[in-house]
Amino acid sequence: MKNKKELSGRKLLGIAGMGWMFDAMDVGMLSFIIAALKVEWDLTPGQMGWIGSINSIGMAVGALIFGLMADRIGRKNVFIITLLLFSIGSGASAFTTTLSAFLVLRFFIGAGLGGELPVASTLVSESVSVEKRGRIVVLLESFWAGGWLIAAVISYFVIPKFGWQAALLISAIPALYALYLRIGLPDSPRFTAIKNKEKISVFQSIKKLWSKEYARQTTMLWIVWFCVVFSYYGMFLWLPSVMIMKGFSLIKSFEYVMIMTLAQLPGYFTAAWCIEKLGRKFVLVVYLIGTAVSAYFFGAADSAALLMLAGILLSFFNLGAWGGLYAYTPEQYPTIIRGTGSGMAASFGRIGGIFGPLLVGYLVAQKVAISTIFMIFCFSVLIGAFAVFFLGKETKNKELV
């Protein structure tokens, strides 16, 4: 029985992880596509920033709506709907010829992506044993690195030779995979156990998040989600473009970012090991501080070697912190409001994702130094680390209710 349960856990991790990987592939390619569109459509820094920000607006809306839906129609159904939404939108965007049409489709892609991530982590968190829960969810997040790596490879070999449209068509493949998911994916056993019981309304769910019992963890999560998403999308969507600003060619910048992306994998794996040994708070605080220090040195780097080292450490610590955040978030709430709580925290965080890319575009247009821009992200991540340290409660080995 135990082996069967473990096999089921591995199967669920693989199914959810593949969806996660396809999401990352789409987001990862977007950073390279922005750099390519700048050349082809002669985009201004402000327009480049809007591509990233409209994606985050969609993610904020998607995380909110689909998080609420997950507590009503189930984690599995929402997971499939969101996966289809962003996959079809991504394929359709390959046929756009104007920035406005591209932005409209990026909104819907973002909505699917924003809804899928917290719902998938909630589904996995509710489906595995307590002693493995944190590690499994961090390993789920590690599929993000695989998706980014595939995105980097596609962008390096496909975009320069065949164009950004071909890259987007490749990213539409997950739509077919989503149909397969519908056949055999089980829903969360915790949601299944309560789905026939009395439901609480959307208003009651939101009110419960801010009740005396949960207000502290809700405040903590909203702060750390905002700070992490603001800095992540501000930094990583602009990575290839920042490399170009520092004097590297389009091809060379793709090559360097692909190497930096490889560092995400050990970041996840070390976080997965530490999270069950040393706790969620330790992983989040240490990896966020590591992200902040790396961001400072990346912005200040004046040589290719220092830029590469700082970029590798930035990927290592930042994505390890993301793994810890996705493991930590669902553990703050009971099953009846877990989808709502996780979705709303992610939704509030996505507001940071709207401002991050826009801020970089604005500051670049104002000729502000890259080192100053990355210093802003350094402070943002530190605020998130302090929020977890002072407001967060350790949830290692805590049984979900």
Image (cartoon, rainbow, N blue to C red):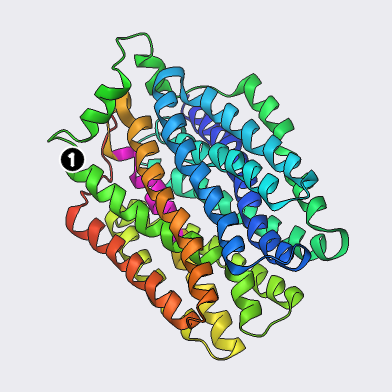
Judging by the rendered image, the residue that carries numbered circle 1 is 215
Looking at the image, residue 93 sits to the left or right of residue 80; the answer is right
Looking at the image, residue 316 sits to the left or right of residue 239; the answer is left
Q: Which image quarter: residue 32?
A: bottom right
Residue visible at 21% across and 29% down in the picture: 208
The residue range painted magenta reads 320-331
Residue visible at 62% across and 80% down in the picture: 245
Q: Position of residue 287 (x, y in %)?
A: 37, 65
Q: Which image quarter: residue 158?
A: bottom right
Residue visible at 16% across and 33% down in the picture: 211
Residue visible at 43% across and 49% down in the picture: 350
The kind of secondary structure the magenta stretch mainly shows is: helix
Looking at the image, residue 95 sits to the left or right of residue 221; the answer is right
In depth, the one of 147 and 33 nearer the eye is 33
Residue located farthest toward the bottom when viewing the structure as drawn: 303
Residue located farthest toward the left when viewing the structure as drawn: 212
How many labels sit on residues? 1
Q: Position of residue 26 (x, y in %)?
A: 65, 49
Residue 205 belongs to magenta span: no
Looking at the image, residue 322 sits to the left or right of residue 16; the answer is left
Q: Quadrant of the C terminus?
A: top left
* Residue 32 appearing in the image: yes
Q: Position of residue 365 (x, y in %)?
A: 54, 75
- Looking at the rendered structure, the secondary structure element under dot 1 is helix
Tell me if mark 1 has few (under 14), some (14-19) or many (20+) residues whose alpha carbon lies within 10 angstroms of its own: some
Q: Amino acid at mark 1?
A: Ala
